[in-house]
Image (cartoon, rainbow, N blue to C red):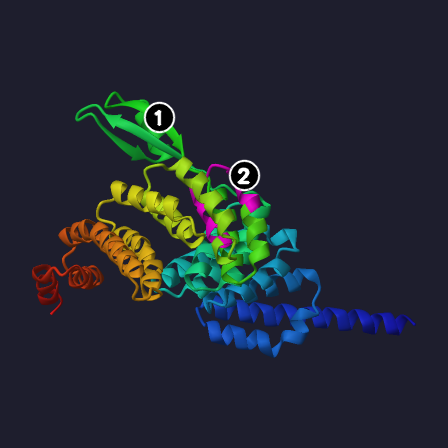
Amino acid sequence: MKHFFTFLLTLVVTLGWAQKKELKQAQKLYKSAKISEAKASLDANQALLESAELKYAAPYNLLRSQISLAEEAYQASYDYLQLAQKSSGLSSKTDEQKRLLISAVINTAIEQSENKEFVASAENLYLSYVIDPVANLDYLYYAASNAVNASEYKLSLKYYQILKDIKYTGITVKHYVTEVANNTEIEVSASEYSIYQKSKDYTNFRTEDTESKFPEIVKNIALIYNQLGEKEKAIAAVKDARAESPNDLGLILTEANIYIELGEKEKFKTLMGEAIAQDPENANLYYNLGVVTADLGDKENARAYYEKAIELDPSMENGYLNLVALILEDETSIVEEMNSLGNSRADNAKYDILKEKRESVYSECVPILKKLMSISDSNQEAARTLMNIYATLGNNEGFMEMKKLLE
């Protein structure tokens, strides 16, 4: 039995010596910038080193992390780093490796974003967050944005959902000072702000919080669900968002747009009314409300909305065209009634009345179209409609003018 223990001790010592020797050799190659040779050495002795006790396994995993970082295999580098961090004796080295890894990941992600490699950038930004969720939380937000830029909506939804769950706001403090010499306010860094407070060259020190990104995040979740065709989840998400920011105009419009896509025009109309209450000078809101109100058959209010849109934005070409189209809808019923009449004296008299009524509808459209033409004489739809109206009204001069313009 004594001989067995002696043999076992000899075997353990020999194995440990071999592990140390191979590890030292790979470390030496790495320090000499022979990355591929160091990796080959580790690969050749992988079984030996991975089965080693912690005092050898931890440095082995740290070296693997360093080699992976050199090869820009960031996920592998992080995986090995996590194994190396099990040894408290290597904390200073693993902390430094973590710092180097984060820096490399973020710099690569920024470069990828600039090159419009949005998916790769998003994944690296997310990795930087995983490595240090506290310090790199902002990068998760940018990862979600890049995923949207790449139209990778499921990936962006994953990131946005994390941000929503932790109620990320992204609020930062901006620092402002005013230069005494020229009375100009400038934005400065936090450290500069502290220094300038001791200087007589600056005055009017103030700070200001940026707006919270949380409403945008929950709004984007709703938009993504809508984009993915998951309407019910989109509605639920936007309701969550509005609970956080009930008066957010963007959220109101998002909910309204989802309802219009679902064909629920009455709900859309109600929400557009809320939007107008928030932004009563927004011509586009009145225009969109006019479109839906017209679809619902309420021509009187639809006309009022179109006219208000034009009043607020006299250059809104679609406002004029939709208003004209709404007015001309009356022509259809007039023409149908004219075509149903016979040749009796009474029918002929009624025909003349209807003809006059039809011409009145056309005449009502003329000043609207002329106003549009004064804004944009290249609007072919307006010119063509006006030409046809002039033809019906017998205005040959106007007809020829529009015809020439079209040609």
Q: Is residue 59 visible?
A: yes
237 with respect to 300 (left or right): right
Q: Which residue is nearer to you in this view: 15 or 235?
A: 235
Type of the residue with mark 1: Arg
The quadrant of the image that shows the N terminus is bottom right
Residue at 14 percent across and 57 percent down: it is: 377
> Which SS type dominates the magenta stretch?
helix
Q: Position of residue 100 (x, y in %)?
A: 47, 56
Nearer the observer, 339 or 58 = 339
Number of the label disc, if any, that sits on residue 206: 1
Residues rendered magenta in the picture: 239-259
Question: In this image, 111 relative to 229: left or right?
Answer: left
Q: Where is residue 292 in the image (x, y as percent from the top left)?
A: 42, 51
The residue carrying mark 2 is 244
Helix, strand or loop at disc 1? strand
Which x, y percent locates residue 73? 50, 68
Q: In which quarter of the image is residue 197?
A: top left
Q: What amino acid is at disc 2?
A: Glu
Q: Distance between the residues labelled 2 and 1?
A: 28 Å
The image shows a total of numbered marks equal to 2
**Residue found farthest to the right:** 1
Image quadrant containing the C terminus: bottom left
Q: Residue at x 59, y 63 (%)?
A: 79
Residue at horizontal 19 percent and vertical 64 percent from the top: 388
Label 2 or label 1, whichever comes before in sequence order: 1
In this view of the protein, which residue sits in the foreground, 335 or 235? 335
Q: Is residue 174 above or below residue 163?
A: above
Answer yes or no: is residue 99 visible: no
Is 224 placed left or right of 46 in the picture?
A: left
Helix, strand or loop under label 2: helix
Q: Residue 312: percent from the left, percent from the top?
A: 27, 41
Front position among marks 2 and 1: 2
